[in-house]
Image: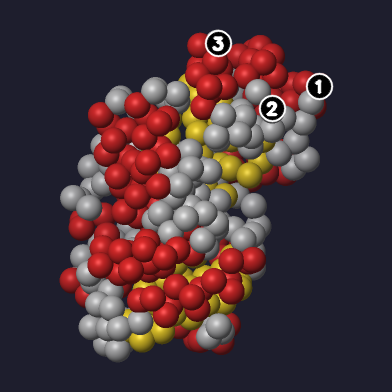
Amino acid sequence: MKITDVKSAVIGANIVIRVVTDKGIDGFSQVETNKDYVRPLIPYFRDMILGCDPTNVENALLRMRRSAAFKPWGKVFSTIEMALWDIAGKAYGLPVYKMLGGSVHEHIEAYASGISHGDYKKRIPECLKNGFDAFKVKVGFGESSDSETLSEVRKMIGQRKLFADANQKWPGAKEAVGQMRILSEYGVDFFEEPVKADLLSEYASIRENKNFRLAAGENLYSRHEFHEYLSRRLVDIIQPDVTKCGGITEARAVCEEAGLYGVKTALHMFGTAVGLAASLNVMFASPQAICMEYDVLDNVMMTGLPLKTFYELKNGRFIIREEMPGVGFEPDADFLNKYSVKK
């Protein structure tokens, strides 16, 4: 089997790619949401792997790593890597999670994500109706706004789990620690990305002053960057994103190292059903996995695209609906043929 092309299409807020082979087996994947500026790089990567056997995933990765595996090109590297796993699984007739060692969970708890101070009144009732028992709310909009949002959300969800995400809003530990009183008051379970990902000393300071779990990782790339967080125990929950960190291979390596340090894993994923499927393959095969992010915002690549997935979201939990070879994402072929553009 040989790779003959790499096609891409912008659908909604995402670039979706399709790695094409001479045997009629295609692999699908997605670039991180709202990163259409990397699309011109796809032909560059395509030329590196044309003629490669896609089932020899590591060999194809080596070709790309030698020339262009660093940020921000790592986003495209990650995307192609996931598509190669999809092809390999289809070629061998196995789900990716079985190629990673098999599922160790009956289900993975889902948490509703994308909720902010501007739309929680709309989103929370919808999520409750759909059976969610965990919710992540964006903070970092000022003490008064954050307090009001967390207070109202807590009233709406009762004793269900509440997480907070600052998206690296605060400049340092001092400002982040100053907001912790509010988070504690409303029973926040974990606090995500209070400061920039490269401020490791600030994370160390924040960790000394917390009384809830600290989470980060979506903006780290490769197992080497994650190693610093894990070996120094800067977080309680590590959050690799398969569309950023280097793909399934790197996410799996991070999860394995996390287990050595007693750190839990909750992969970050804010985008499409194909990225979610790739993430869940890693999560189901990872003993330390605790919960999986689910983007509740309107997204054609989550709810508007005709597709079939190996997973099902039922009563706030992801379960394996059926065994599907590869990543377990099968879109409507006519839809993708219509919108795929060879560039």
Lateral position of residue 80 relative to residue 208, left or right: left
Q: Quadrant of the N terminus?
A: bottom left
- Residue located 26% across and 63% down the image: 58
Q: Nearer the viewer, residue 215 or 314?
A: 215
Task: Tell me which numbered mark, 1 or 3, is placed earlier along the sequence.
Answer: 1
- Circles 1 and 3, Cβ within 8 Å, touching? The answer is no
Which residue position holds label 3?
209
In this picture, residue 14 sits left or right of residue 284: right
Q: Nearer the viewer, mark 2 or mark 1?
A: 2
Q: Nearer the viewer, mark 2 or mark 3?
A: 2
Disc 3 on helix, strand or loop?
Answer: loop
Q: Residue at x 63, y 66 (%)?
A: 36
| Amino acid carrying mark 3 in the image | Asn
Residue 178 placed where, x, y %?
69, 14
Q: Residue 9 sits in which quadrant? A: bottom right
Residue under pointer 2: 171
Dot 1 corresponds to which residue? 144
Q: CA distance from mark 2 to mark 1?
A: 18 Å
**Residue 261 seen in the current view:** yes
Q: How many marks?
A: 3
State how the image is colored.
secondary structure
Badge 2 or badge 3: first in the primary sequence? 2
In the rendered structure, the answer to whether residue 74 lies left or right of residue 141 reads: left
Crowding at dot 3, Cα within 10 Å, few <14 / some 14-19 / many 20+, comes out as few
Tell me which amino acid carries mark 2: Pro
In the image, residue 249 sits, relative to residue 171, either above or below, namely below
The quadrant in which the C terminus is found is: bottom right
Q: Is residue 308 visible?
A: no
Q: In this picture, is 217 found above or below 314?
A: above
**Helix, strand or loop for disc 1:** helix
Q: Position of residue 78 (x, y in %)?
A: 43, 59
User: x, y (%) of residue 228?
Assistant: 40, 31
